[in-house]
Image (spheres, rainbow, N blue to C red):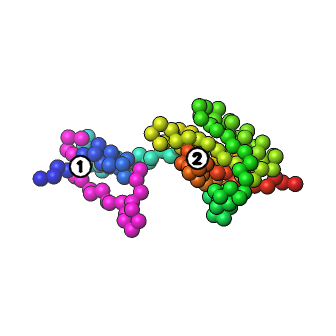
């Protein structure tokens, strides 16, 4: 036999139900009306019993932080020319041995200088890390999508095996503005 919901149970359920969105095509389930608990009712015999209203959920004033979209992939024909070395890789940077902060700064400076010199393709070597999931390898695409260097980048793709494979990235740069 089910016991009737207490006021505390209804309040707790209202808090939970207010924080979730129903799946498409579904609605919030209606909370069944429960009979008031005689032990909790202290109203006068002639007065109407008021049901407690669940508190409204507090929404934060700050908007959720959006991560910028990852850089676009290099055009397939351009990547093929880089892999076959018909287009030159004009500069390389090796981030091995750097911590995250230094690697990010070095990468941004390298990309700014390369773009200013008019380079069209560069190689960023991150390494694979100890177990194939290194921090620099994971974070580099995020750094390449930051607003500071985004205007310079035309596309990013994983390097071919002979250029470093999973531990390196081709970065295609846009032409400098005249």
Disc 1 crowd rating (10 Å Cα; few below 14, some 14-19, many 20+) is some
- Where residue 134 appears, as percent x and y from the top left, is 51, 39
Total numbered labels placed on residues in the image: 2
**Residue 90 vertical placement versus 27 (above, below):** above
**Residue 168 vertical placement versus 77 (above, below):** above
Circle 2 SS class: loop
The residue pinned by badge 2 equals: 164
The residue segment tinted magenta is: 18-40
- Where residue 55 appears, as percent x and y from the top left, is 41, 46
- Where residue 57 appears, as percent x and y from the top left, is 44, 47
Q: Nearer the viewer, mark 2 or mark 1?
A: 2
Q: Which numbered dot is residue 5?
A: 1
Q: Residue at x 41, y 65 (%)?
A: 24
The quarter of the picture where the C terminus appears is: bottom right
Q: Residue at x 44, y 47 (%)?
A: 56
Relative to residue 92, is residue 5 drawn left or right? Answer: left
In the image, residue 28 lies in the stretch drawn in magenta: yes
Q: Residue at x 24, y 41 (%)?
A: 40
Q: Tell me the distance, in whole angstroms, between the alpha carbons under discs 2 and 1.
A: 63 Å
Can the viewer see residue 61 in this picture? Answer: no
Q: Nearer the viewer, residue 137 or 88?
A: 88
- The image quarter containing residue 82 is bottom right
**Residue 174 vertical placement versus 55 (above, below):** below
Q: Residue furthest bottom?
A: 25
């Amino acid at each position: 036999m089910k016991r009737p919901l207490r006021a505390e149970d209804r309040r707790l359920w209202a808090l939970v139900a207010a924080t979730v969105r129903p799946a498409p095509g579904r609605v919030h389930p209606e909370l069944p009306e429960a009979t008031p608990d005689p032990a909790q009712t202290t109203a006068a015999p002639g007065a109407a019993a008021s049901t407690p209203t669940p508190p409204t959920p507090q929404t934060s004033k700050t908007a959720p932080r959006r991560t910028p979209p990852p850089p676009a992939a290099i055009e397939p024909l351009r990547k093929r020319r880089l892999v076959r070395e018909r287009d030159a890789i004009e500069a390389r940077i090796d981030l091995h041995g750097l911590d995250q902060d230094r690697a990010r700064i070095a990468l941004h400076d390298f990309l700014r200088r390369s773009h200013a010199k008019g380079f069209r393709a560069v190689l960023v070597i991150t390494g694979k890390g100890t177990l194939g999931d290194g921090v620099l390898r994971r974070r580099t695409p995020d750094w390449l999508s930051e607003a500071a260097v985004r205007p310079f980048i035309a596309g990013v793709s994983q390097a071919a095996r002979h250029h470093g494979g999973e531990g390196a990235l081709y970065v295609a740069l846009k032409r400098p503005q005249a």
